[in-house]
């Protein structure tokens, strides 16, 4: 399927600090990286002229260990780029703190369904020629201090543009910033443009700025101001030097005391979007002077569909691999076949957990999945808010078991405490409810988990979940969500049809805690458990409609098509229209 025919030599360059492209390449930490990988995969499927740019992260993210009390420790993940990536014969230098830093480049080819290739470039500064302190700059994803992080962002943005110029020969490059980490690419483009027009970088004119803006697309992912990357101006000056820092200050995209990467991205972009309709609204409230659109995230359908469902779709929904919209017709799949495929995915998950932990779960028991990064706003432990009530539900209504997984960032102490508290709560219910916390959440296990549980639970504090994607992975595999009305679930939720809501979106979030907790227990007790243990196909119908309604829409093929017609090569000539607001 070719969405657009491009006359010129246009190219989309997608910049992301993390990319989850293959379970054996540990250069991602979570949702942002998985989204980047799925985006590039769908770009390849749709034959988009596209490349990806990221950093090598030679020491990977980290391997999580949990002791008997749920105390997390971290180990480096050793991986060998030469086993997975192709070294390119290209080197580029970039000035950081006045030193020349040599950047080497590695390539990974992402091959789409029809063979089209989207190359992904990994930048690497480990070269012997570099000063000692620069060799490790591309080692750790989200490691180190602010200075280290800013150096990485300079490498990704400015180094990334330099690498592109050395590799691709395209006059029309559209740069897509996946979050603010790569926003300094705008400075590199400004530099190119002023040079071409033979004036100094510090004397950039509105015409130069407009020329950069014509090239840039910015996706914001963070619904709270504190989540945006900022660096003190003194640090920026020492890393970037006077000319570049003065240029940033002259174009008035940052204040005198700090460089806010989000503002930089917003200022220089012709198209800006949030990652779900609700997140678009929240972002417009946060940045009222920018035209912010919304394109809701997705997941790569073939990548996240488990084997038994792939077989089922191949039989009943022919063409779904090339065109995910056909999944809408999953409504025609017999319920008995859905149940059978799900039972296989569940057995496969339980086998994996037995191998990893020695723990044996019961295949006939309603199994809840709760997995994501552990950090306070995600409230992984919300289901344990009232232990007595949870116990009585499991005792009186029907048995439950819970599978947890998720890492806390090494410096997120409250996030680590939540894991410990989950261990304590598990001990308090373990005569009635089997709870297992599986270490080291990563792509391969996520795939089995999202497909193999019976119900996917997500309980973030509104409006902090910009989108969320794991419920989409679950939906593709016929696993309904039971979630707080935030992010994508505001759109994907049809009560009792694609899953259930926790709490009431009409109640202001700050007053909603007890309401949400109440709703969680109430619906488990009165709706979900009775449906699951009731007649043979009641629950199966919800499973099937989550595939048909949500699997067919919340995928990156639909998302990429929307980026193509709204952001990359706009069919409306780039005019902004406020995307519709969703009513509950
Ligand atoms: C999908 C995925 C995530 C993101 O999940 P959210 O629901 O968006 O928080 C994080 N980690 C892994 C390993 C994943 O596969």
Image (cartoon, rainbow, N blue to C red):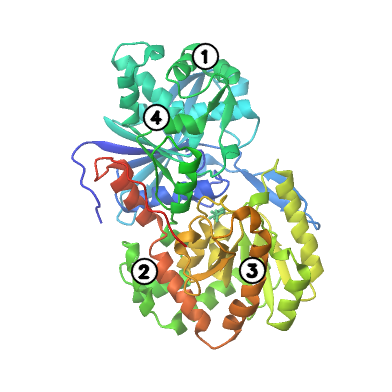
The answer to whether the residue labelled 2 contacts the one labelled 1, judged by CB atoms less than 8 Å apart, is no
Total residue callouts: 4
Which badge, 4 or 3, comes first in the chain's sequence? 4
- For residue 268, the mark is 4
Q: Is residue 526 above or below residue 234?
A: below
Task: Tell me the CA gap for discs 2 and 1.
Answer: 53 Å
Relative image position of residue 264 (x, y in whole percent): 46, 29
Is label 4 or label 3 in front?
3
According to the picture, the residue beneath numbered tag 1 turns out to be 241
Label 4 residue SS: loop
Callout 2 touching callout 3 (CB < 8 Å): no
- For numbered disc 3, what is the local secondary structure? helix
User: Mark 2 = which residue?
Assistant: 327
Tell me if mark 1 has few (under 14), some (14-19) or many (20+) residues whose alpha carbon lies within 10 angstroms of its own: some
Q: Is mark 1 within 8 Å of ligand 1?
A: no
- Residue positioned 51% across, 83% down in the render: 538
Q: Residues within 10 Å of mark 2 (few under 14, many from 20)?
A: many
Residue under the image location 69 percent in, 65 percent down:
383
Q: Which residue is mark 3?
A: 520
Of the numbered discs 1 and 4, the one sitting upstream in the chain is 1
Q: How many angstroms separate mark 4 from mark 3 (CA)?
A: 43 Å
Q: Nearer the viewer, mark 2 or mark 4?
A: 4
- Residue 382 shown left or right of residue 167 in the figure: right
Quadrant assignment, res 332: bottom left
């Amino acid at each position: 399927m070719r969405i657009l025919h491009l006359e010129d030599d246009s190219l989309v360059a997608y910049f992301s600090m993390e990319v989850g492209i293959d379970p054996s390449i540990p250069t991602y930490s979570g949702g942002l990286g998985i989204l980047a990988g799925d985006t590039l995969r769908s770009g390849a499927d749709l034959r988009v002229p596209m490349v990806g740019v990221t950093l090598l992260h030679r020491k990977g993210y980290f391997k999580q260990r949990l002791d008997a009390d749920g105390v997390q420790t971290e180990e480096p993940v050793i991986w060998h780029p030469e086993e997975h990536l192709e070294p390119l014969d290209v080197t580029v230098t970039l000035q950081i703190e006045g030193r020349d830093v040599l950047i080497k480049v590695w390539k990974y080819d992402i091959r789409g369904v029809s063979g089209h290739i989207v190359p992904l470039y990994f930048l690497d500064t480990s070269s012997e020629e570099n000063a000692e302190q620069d060799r490790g700059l591309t080692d750790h994803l989200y490691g180190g201090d602010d200075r280290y992080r800013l150096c990485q962002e300079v490498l990704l943005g400015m180094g990334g543009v330099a690498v592109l110029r050395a590799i691709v020969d395209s006059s029309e490059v559209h740069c897509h910033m996946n979050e603010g980490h790569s926003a300094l690419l705008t400075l590199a483009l400004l530099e190119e443009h002023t040079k071409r027009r033979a004036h100094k970088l510090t004397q950039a004119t509105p015409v130069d700025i407009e020329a950069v803006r014509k090239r840039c697309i910015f996706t914001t992912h963070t619904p709270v101001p504190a989540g945006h990357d900022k660096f003190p101006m003194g640090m920026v000056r020492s890393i970037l030097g006077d000319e570049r820092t003065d240029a940033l200050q002259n174009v008035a995209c940052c204040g005198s005391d700090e460089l806010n990467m989000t503002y930089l991205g917003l200022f220089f972009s012709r198209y800006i979007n949030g990652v779900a309709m609700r997140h678009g609204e929240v972002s417009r409230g946060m940045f009222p002077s920018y035209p912010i659109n919304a394109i809701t995230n997705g997941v790569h359908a073939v990548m996240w569909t488990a084997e038994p469902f792939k077989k089922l779709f191949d039989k009943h929904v022919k063409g779904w691999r090339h065109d995910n919209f056909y999944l809408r017709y999953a409504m025609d799949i017999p319920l008995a076949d859905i149940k059978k495929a799900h039972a296989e995915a569940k057995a496969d998950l339980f086998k994996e957990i037995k191998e990893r932990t020695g723990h044996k779960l019961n295949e006939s028991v309603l199994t809840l999945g709760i997995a994501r990064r552990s950090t306070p706003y995600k409230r992984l432990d919300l289901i344990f808010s009232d232990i007595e009530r949870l116990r009585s539900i499991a005792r009186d209504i029907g048995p439950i078991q819970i599978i947890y997984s998720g890492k806390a960032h090494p410096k997120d102490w409250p996030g680590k405490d939540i894991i410990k508290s989950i261990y304590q709560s598990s001990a308090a219910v373990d005569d009635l409810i089997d709870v297992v916390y599986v270490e080291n959440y990563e792509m391969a296990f996520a795939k089995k988990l999202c497909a193999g549980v019976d119900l996917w639970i997500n309980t973030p504090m509104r409006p902090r979940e910009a989108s969320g994607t794991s419920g989409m992975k679950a939906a593709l595999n016929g696993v309904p969500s039971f979630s707080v009305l935030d992010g994508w679930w505001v759109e994907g939720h049809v009560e009792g049809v694609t899953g259930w809501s926790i709490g009431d979106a009409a109640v202001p979030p700050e007053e909603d805690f007890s309401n949400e907790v109440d709703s969680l227990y109430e619906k488990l007790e009165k709706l979900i458990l009775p449906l699951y243990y009731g007649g043979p196909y009641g629950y199966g119908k919800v499973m099937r409609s989550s595939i048909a309604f949500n699997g067919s829409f919340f995928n990156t093929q639909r998302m990429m098509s929307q980026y193509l017609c709204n952001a990359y090569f706009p069919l409306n000539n780039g005019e902004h229209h406020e995307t519709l607001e969703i009513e509950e």
